[in-house]
Image (tube, grey):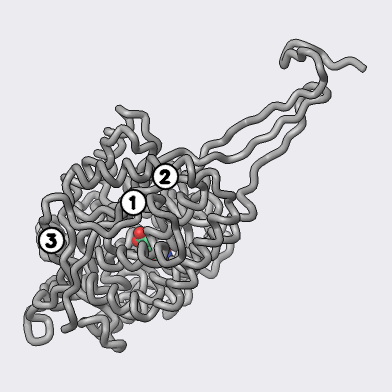
Amino acid sequence: MSETKEYKNYINGEWRDSKDGKTFEDRNPANWDDVVGTFPLSTKEDVEDAVRAAKETYPKWKKVPVPKRAEILRRAAEILLERKEEISRLMTREMGKVLKEARGDVQEAIDTGFYAFGEGRRLFSQNTPSELPNKFALTFRQPMGVWAVITPWNFPSALPSWKIFPAILAGNTVVFKPPSDAPAVAYEFVRALVDAGLPPGVLNLVYGSGSVVGEALITHPDIVGISFTGSSETGMRIAEVAGKQLKKISLELGGKNPQIVMWSADIDLAVDGAIWGAYGTTGQRCTATSRLILHEKIYDEFMHKFIERAKQLKIGYGLDETVEVGPVINESQLKKIMKYVEIGQKEGAHLELGGHRLTEGEYAKGWFFEPTVFTGVTPDMTIAQDEIFGPVLSVFKVSSFEEAIAVANNTRYGLSSSIYTRDVVEAMRAIEELEAGITYINAPTIGAETHLPFGGVKHTGNGHREGGWTAYEIFTEWKTVYIDFSGKLQKAQIDTWEE
Ligand code: UN1
């Protein structure tokens, strides 16, 4: 066990306690006796202060040339790189993902920072011909104002980076509400930007509950846009508020991601992919594989190999480098997973592996749950439809490619998807027919790279894509400019061109 640190909000360039001095604790999910830190339980007034600071800073920040803003982000990414090991260890301690994955999470933020640096000298816009002579028609991107950024605990450094780097590079200012289950890494992320020389007020950090801080933020009249990753319920609440106030929103919500394995697939490769996709990050990714769709011809061979592998997964505290599956995030999430296991059994699915909480020995003080497999799942079952966000996999048996695609698409979500096949026609058809924002061929549903669009169709999102160049679409608005140098009144759509 290591030290417990006292953390503060960051508002207008100052580290501050909450207005009424209240705090909350962040505990290690692998050992609840280990208190990582205490954090301000902020009030509505703290949110007011943060939004005011961001609003006052906005006119100055948007005047800073984009390549100059970008230099600060490059320094922040360099600082994250220097501190990568320390932040990764803190991440494992506060939210349980195994160290190797924690390092990947910090690397995602570093990559996103360097991408943002490059984008600072790009941020391309268009120049297009006018229908009239002696007239230019062109566009450029403008920032929008103060954005609220609300992130989940499962990617404590990657997800803030996906939102905050593009938002501030584009010239917006930000109020950031981090998750209460991974607040210390959020502090490290903000500290990297502060140490890189980000001016006061550009990024403000307010800790606290969703019901107080989150609600005050999303309803604040000076917030122009809300970027959110998390549950569909909260996403719907944000969309409702934004609808009434005409705020811009970018929502990244649930997933129920399928991996299809066809009979021509390399079975060992597909087993590797499914193990990593289903149990990496203890199944707590938006992109986690939660449905496995197996062709009947390879079903027995695949399942035999898969169960053998799943049984051997080493569960424990992720700072031990040999551990492969960490704890789930907290008690309420553990209870939710247990509830779904109960529902699965009641609805007639067969519990093939796992299904229990681990409570003995090294697991006594943590939220550990066995890697779990349900077979005989049909698309109408609750466990086939709801996002469980834990190490629970539902397996379907199908007899054709068409049936595999139909089962895969039978969900309200559409984030990631995968197919293992050596048949090029099946691969090409899957690319076209799978209803998802991301499709992997012969690779698992997890593993998105930061410079490509990331997001989903149907109830997973609202049409935006984070990552790469598309993130900049979210945080900017187009200005269209017409420059007429003909010296006379020219009427579009009416005047015809004559020499
Ligand atoms: C998420 O779960 O919200 O592709 C993000 C992946 C990661 C990102 C996941 N690079 O699984």
Gap in angstroms between the C-alphas marked 3 and 1: 22 Å
| Residue topped by disc 3 | 24
- Which numbered disc flags the more N-terminal residue, 3 or 1? 1
What is the crowding at mark 1: few (fewer than 14 residues within 10 Å), some, or many (at least 20)?
A: many
| Residue topped by disc 2 | 57
Image location (x, y in percent) of residue 45: 19, 43
Image location (x, y in percent) of residue 98: 29, 78
- Closer to the eye: label 3 or 1: 1
What is the crowding at mark 2: few (fewer than 14 residues within 10 Å), some, or many (at least 20)?
A: many
Please, what is the three-letter code of the amino acid marked with disc 3? Phe
The residue positioned 48% from the left and 68% from the top of the image is 77
Image location (x, y in percent) of residue 166: 48, 53
Please, what is the three-letter code of the amino acid marked with disc 2? Thr
Which element type, helix, strand or loop, lies under badge 2? Answer: helix
Q: Is residue 352 visible?
A: no
Please, what is the three-letter code of the amino acid marked with disc 1? Asn
Task: Tell me: residue 302, above or below residue 118.
Answer: below
Gap in angstroms between the C-alphas marked 2 and 1: 9 Å
| Residue topped by disc 1 | 12
Q: Is residue 344 visible?
A: yes
Left or right: 313 as drawn, with respect to 356: right
The residue positioned 73% from the left and 27% from the top of the image is 483
Check if mark 2's residue and mark 1's residue have beta carbons within 8 Å: yes
Left or right: 4 as drawn, with respect to 57: left
